[in-house]
C-alpha cells in the first residue's frame, strides 16, 4: 500500500501505468489517495496546467510525494532518485529540496528517449528561472542577496513588525493597520512574505494595488475611517495568512475579496504601464 500526495498551483492529474489515480487543483490543500501497488516495475506520470487567475501569488508549480505503509518517503519531486548529470560547472543544493545548476552544456536522456541517430538534432530547450536563492552557502549568504522584505502592500519595515516603515512618502494599508494596533504581529509577518513574492512574481498586480491603496491610507489617521477599512482588510489578511501557511483556518470572505480585487489591481497596473 502506498500513499500518493499531490498539489499544484493550477490543475494536475497523476497516473499509474497509464491510469489516472489522483487529481489536484490547489497548492495549499494537497490531494491524497492510497493505492495497492503490485510488486514489479511501474510508470508514474503526471500532467499539470497553470492557473494564474486563481493562484497568482505563487510561481507555477507541481509537487508529488509517495510514502509506504510505514510512512517512509519512497519518492518525491523535491529530491527525485536516479537522476544523473554531466558537464555541470556548479551544483547548488537548495534548502527545501532540488538543485540549481550553472554552466550546463549537455542533457542526459533516459531509457524512454528515442534511439534513432540524430533524432534530437536541432531541438531547442528554453528555460526561464526566477526567485531562486541558495541558503546553504558558507555564512548563509544568499545568491543573489535577499532584497529588503516588503509587505504585500508595499511597506518596507525598518526594524521588524510595527517599526513604522513606508514606501516613499506614504504608508500602505496593512502596514498602517499594524501601526494602529489593528493587525496582529503574526499576520503582519505573513504579509511581509506575501508582499515580497507578489512584487517579484506579479509586479503588475502589486503596483496596481499600491496605486489606489495610497489614497486609502491618507484617510486612515481618522480612527473611524481606519476601522471601516479594517472591516475589509481583516478578512483579506486572514485569507492571505492562510495561503501563506501562517494560519490553518481560511477566511471565506477574504477569499472572495482577493478574487475580486486581483483583476482590479491587474487592470490598474496595466493602465499605469507597470
Image: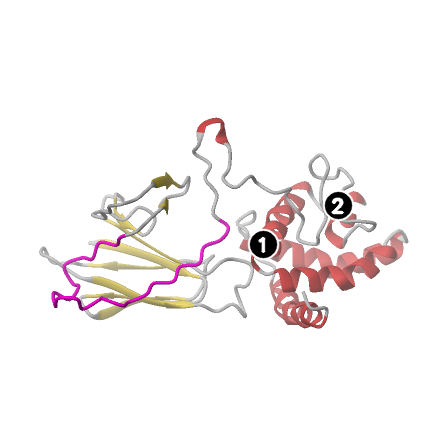
- 126 part of magenta stretch: yes
Give the main secondary structure of the magenta stretch: loop
Residue occupied by mark 2: 178
**Span of residues in magenta:** 106-131
Query: Which one is closest to the eye, mark 2 or mark 1?
Result: 1
CA distance for labels 2 and 1: 23 Å
Q: Is residue 46 visible?
A: yes
Residue 249 in sight from this viewpoint: no
Residue 119 on the magenta span: yes
Compare residues 236 and 45 and report the one nearer the observer: 45
Position of residue 272 measured from the top left corner of the image (x, y, whole percent): 72, 68
Front residue (pair 267, 264): 267
In the picture, which quadrant includes the N terminus?
A: bottom left
According to the image, label 1 marks what residue? 200
Q: Residue at x 45, y 27 (%)?
A: 138
Q: Which of the pair 74/127 is nearer the observer? A: 127
Q: Secondary structure at mark 1?
A: helix
Q: Residues within 10 Å of mark 2 (few under 14, many from 20)?
A: some
Amino acid at each position: 500500500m502506498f500513499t500518493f500526495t499531490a498539489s499544484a498551483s493550477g490543475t494536475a492529474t497523476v497516473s499509474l501505468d497509464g491510469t489516472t489515480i489522483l487529481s489536484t487543483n490547489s497548492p495549499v490543500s494537497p490531494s491524497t489517495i492510497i493505492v495497492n501497488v503490485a510488486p514489479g516495475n511501474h510508470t508514474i506520470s503526471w500532467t499539470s496546467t497553470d492557473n494564474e487567475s486563481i493562484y497568482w501569488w505563487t510561481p507555477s508549480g507541481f509537487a508529488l510525494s509517495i510514502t509506504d505503509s510505514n510512512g517512509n518517503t519512497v519518492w518525491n519531486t523535491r529530491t527525485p532518485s536516479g537522476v544523473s548529470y554531466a558537464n555541470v560547472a556548479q551544483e547548488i543544493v537548495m534548502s527545501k529540496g532540488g538543485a540549481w545548476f550553472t554552466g550546463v552544456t549537455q542533457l542526459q536522456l533516459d531509457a524512454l528517449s528515442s534511439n534513432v541517430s540524430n533524432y534530437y538534432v536541432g531541438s531547442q530547450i528554453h528555460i526561464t528561472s526566477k526567485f531562486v536563492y541558495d541558503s546553504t552557502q558558507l555564512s548563509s549568504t544568499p545568491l543573489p542577496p535577499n532584497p529588503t522584505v516588503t509587505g504585500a502592500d508595499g511597506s518596507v519595515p525598518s526594524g521588524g513588525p510595527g517599526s513604522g516603515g513606508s514606501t516613499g512618502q506614504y504608508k500602505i494599508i496593512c502596514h498602517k493597520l499594524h501601526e494602529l494596533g489593528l493587525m496582529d504581529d503574526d499576520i503582519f509577518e505573513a504579509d511581509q512574505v506575501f508582499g515580497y513574492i507578489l512584487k517579484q512574481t506579479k509586479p503588475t498586480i502589486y503596483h496596481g494595488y499600491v496605486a489606489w491603496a495610497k489614497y486609502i491610507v491618507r484617510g486612515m489617521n481618522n480612527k473611524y475611517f481606519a476601522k471601516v477599512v479594517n472591516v475589509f482588510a481583516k478578512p483579506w489578511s486572514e485569507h492571505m495568512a492562510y495561503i501563506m501557511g501562517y494560519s490553518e483556518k481560511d477566511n471565506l470572505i477574504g477569499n472572495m475579496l482577493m478574487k475580486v480585487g486581483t483583476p482590479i489591481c491587474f487592470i490598474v497596473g496595466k493602465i499605469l504601464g507597470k
